[in-house]
Image (cartoon, grey):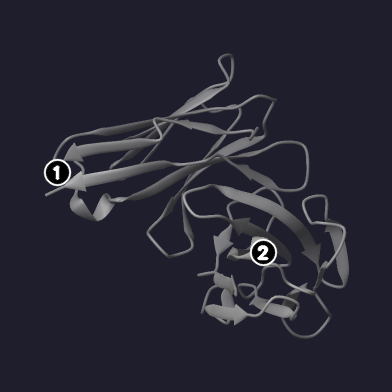
Amino acid sequence: NAGVMQNPRHLVRRRGQEARLRCSPMKGHSHVYWYRQLPEEGLKFMVYLQKENIIDESGMPKERFSAEFPKEGPSILRIQQVVRGDSAAYFCASSGERDYGYTFGSGTRLTVV
Amino acid sequence: SQQGEEDPQALSIQEGENATMNCSYKTSINNLQWYRQNSGRGLVHLILIRSNEREKHSGRLRVTLDTSKKSSSLLITASRAADTASYFCATWQAGNMLTFGGGTRLMVKP
């Protein structure tokens, strides 16, 4: 069981480009969560998805950010027209039950130059 | 402000000593969880305690929960240098996600 797989581990984008972050949940897990972490801070919730459904996107900025979890393939967090303030570590987590413990991926560190 | 707030923000101890971290939260919860994060890595789930539980043990970890005070503590006994990490509490409320605190950065000196 490979756990939660995120790629890429590091991503550098110029301002205005698009960033696409991928997350494959742990086998058997149907709940996927995306969090953002700034240096020396805690994790901020962005979005919660199940297969083909966005359940809660209350933590995601209304503009430029979108997420999906298609029937086949990984969950994708997409950031369009990136700005320097988007630089952060983005973590994906999955769980088998809604209110149980999460399994986290190693994160994608996005740097916008 | 965040649902869970850890205290202290940073803690430095010698190997072999015990480390205690506290977490306070604001609203009613279904469960509270503790996670560890090593520098540059993802979070690792340590322990979950439900709202109807008062204490839970896992190896060298002991977690307590006081719902009347809306607080929890994580005790690491006989600490090791390898315990150096950031520790986060997270609460599951009636919503759809875990809400994390700002973390306690623990340094264990050999």
Q: Position of residue A25 (x, y in %)?
A: 64, 73
Q: Amino acid at mark 1?
A: Glu
Q: Position of residue A3 (x, y in %)?
A: 53, 73
Residue occupying the point 87% across, 58% down: A62
Residue occupying the point 63% across, 58% down: A36
- In 3D space, how far apart are the residues under numbered discs 2 and 1 (Cα atoms)? 38 Å
Residue occupying the point 19% across, 52% down: B81
Relative placement, left or right, of A88 versus B87 is: right
Relative placement, left or right, of A33 versus B85 is: right
Q: Examine the rendering and report whether any part of residue B4 can be seen.
A: yes
Q: Quadrant of residue A113?
A: bottom right
User: Quick one: SS at disc 1?
Assistant: loop
Q: Residue furthest top?
A: B68
Q: Nearer the viewer, mark 2 or mark 1?
A: 2
Is there CB contact under 8 Å for labels 2 and 1? Answer: no
Numbered circles on residues, count? 2
User: Quick one: SS at disc 2?
Assistant: helix
- Res. B15 mark: 1
- Res. A73 mark: none
Q: Is residue B63 above or below residue A59?
A: above
Mark 2 lies on residue? A86
Q: Is residue B85 above or below residue A52?
A: above
Q: Is residue A73 above or below residue B67?
A: below
Residue occupying the point 83% across, 79% down: A70
The chain that hosts pointer 2 is: A
Q: Is residue B28 above or below residue B43?
A: above
Between B38 and B30, the one nearer to me in the picture: B38
Q: Amino acid at mark 2?
A: Asp
